[in-house]
Amino acid sequence: MTNETMPAPPRRLRYPALLELIILGGLTLVLMVALMMIRSTVMERAQRAQSVRAEISSGWGQSQTVGGPVLVVPYRVRHVDAYGKQQVSINRARFLPDKLIVRGQLLPERRHRGIFETVLYRAQLRMEGELTRPDFASWGVAAEDVLWNEAMVTIGVSDLRGIRGNPVMRWHDRALTFSGGSGDPRLWSSGLTAARPFAEAAPSARYPFALDLTLNGSEQIGFYPLGAETVVEMSSPWPDPSFTGAFLPESRRITPRGFTARWSISSLARSYPQRWRESGDESALAAVAPSAFSVGLFTPVSHYQQTERSLKYGALFIVLTFVTFFLYELLSPVTLHPVQYFLVGGALCLFYLLLLSISEHAPFAVAYAIASVATVSLITAYGAALLHSKLRVLGLATVLALLYGYLYVLLNLEDWALLMGSIGLFLILALVMYATRTVDWGSAHLGMSREREA
């Protein structure tokens, strides 16, 4: 038999198969430590961005929650103490609107500080409705004990720094001017108060009201459904609204040009009445707060979140790339050193640091493309010096390109990520099992002879 037709001796690894796998496992653990350090950097940058957004919002206005108007009327309570003496104390009664209609528009504004960005808004609200004349007779309160001259109309606004202008309410046939302060701290901690809404002892049967209110805020704006019938209509040119709270909109329309939403809520859907008297140390806010609903200017997943999500697949990328090189060692006349594996793993880790730093200055898709092309090019160029075959280098580049393309798809699928990830891992495992089906792992020889490559 000539040398040309003589079977080639089985190919051996640099180390026994089990030892080499242990070495590669140790390298993977070391590189996972590097991935953890990169993840901590991502979290640190995300926290920095959040603190900058908070600083910007603090000078503009935080998330806003609007409630009211609520009519608060003090009254005297007469009782006899344990010593038989007549005592008089002052309690408050709260009356909510029979009808409350809020129409508003959210105008978003982007603000930057350095490389960080946040989205703020200016809300232009029109509040209309009416309130029935307060009735104290059913509570057994004498007419002379009702302190009409100390009554007030209060509107809850969670962050008064966001108020623009001097809002004036049209109340029946009067104009009410507001001052800062809730006037009723058990109802809400901050707000606006208009004193003395009644020129006399509430002679009218109904009190219609109207108020134009301009608010600056950030992230979201919420409302309390204080009317016996509450209708809220909001619109905005922002294309990504987020609806949260106790009630979702009855109808909504979302387009790339913005959204409109409408809520219609009955008082039967909440846990507090249309009127109640103050008793003891009760907190009215504790009863009212759970009924709030809101709409926010949702910001799609930030590049920090996407980078953090991609890091979850870091160990998988290292393992699959190591498996690719290991199969080349196992199935072709290539011998690699653990240091070479480590350098390849270092390049894989560096991808995430590149992705983080570039995405702070460019859209995430562009940053991902630059980082992945740079990483694939680096590992492919290094592999060309190790694998000694254009076909093997092409195979390596294809595997890496597919991995990074597959990761990008997973990052954008979100709801389907688990399903696609499971299917992808199954196919990868099937491919590895097929490629190593003839390997005699006990001796690290191939289970079949093959001709020596030229």
Image: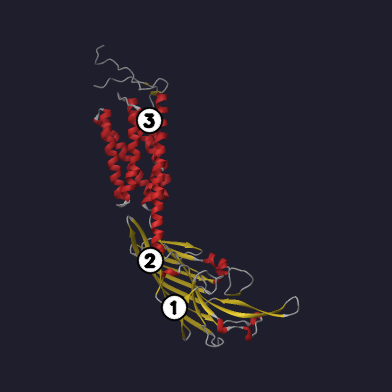
- Answer yes or no: is residue 58 visible: yes
Q: Which numbered mark, 3 or 2, is in the foreground of this view?
A: 2
- Residue 258, percent across and down? 35, 65
Where is residue 453 shown, x and y percent of the image?
26, 22
When the figure is inspected, residue 143 is found, relative to residue 395, above or below; the finding is: below
**Residue 434: image tag:** 3
- Where the N terminus falls, by quadrant? top left
The kind of secondary structure element at disc 3 is helix
Callout 1: helix, strand or loop? strand
Q: Is residue 36 above or below residue 109?
A: above
Tell me, yes or no, if residue 420 can be seen here: no
**Mark 2 falls on what kind of element?**
strand
- Using the image as rendered, state which of residue 82 and residue 187 is in the foreground: 82
Residue 136 percent coordinates (x, y): 62, 81
Q: Answer with the quarter of the image where residue 422 lies.
A: top left
| Residue 12, image x, y percentages | 35, 21
Q: Reading the chain from its start, which is encountered first: label 3 or label 1?
A: 1
Whole-angstrom CA distance, mark 1 to mark 2, is 20 Å
Going by the numbered disc 2, the residue's amino acid type is Tyr
Assess whether mark 2 and mark 1 are in contact (beta carbons under 8 angstroms): no
Q: Quadrant of residue 329?
A: top left
Q: Earlier in the sequence, mark 1 or mark 2?
A: 2
Mark 2, residues whose alpha carbon is within 10 Å: few (<14), some, or many (≥20)? many
Residue kind at label 1, given as amino acid type: Leu
Say which label, 3 or 2, has the lower sequence index: 2
Q: Which residue is mark 1?
A: 211
Q: CA distance from mark 3 to mark 2?
A: 57 Å
Q: Tag 3: residue type?
A: Tyr
Q: Which residue is mark 2?
A: 121
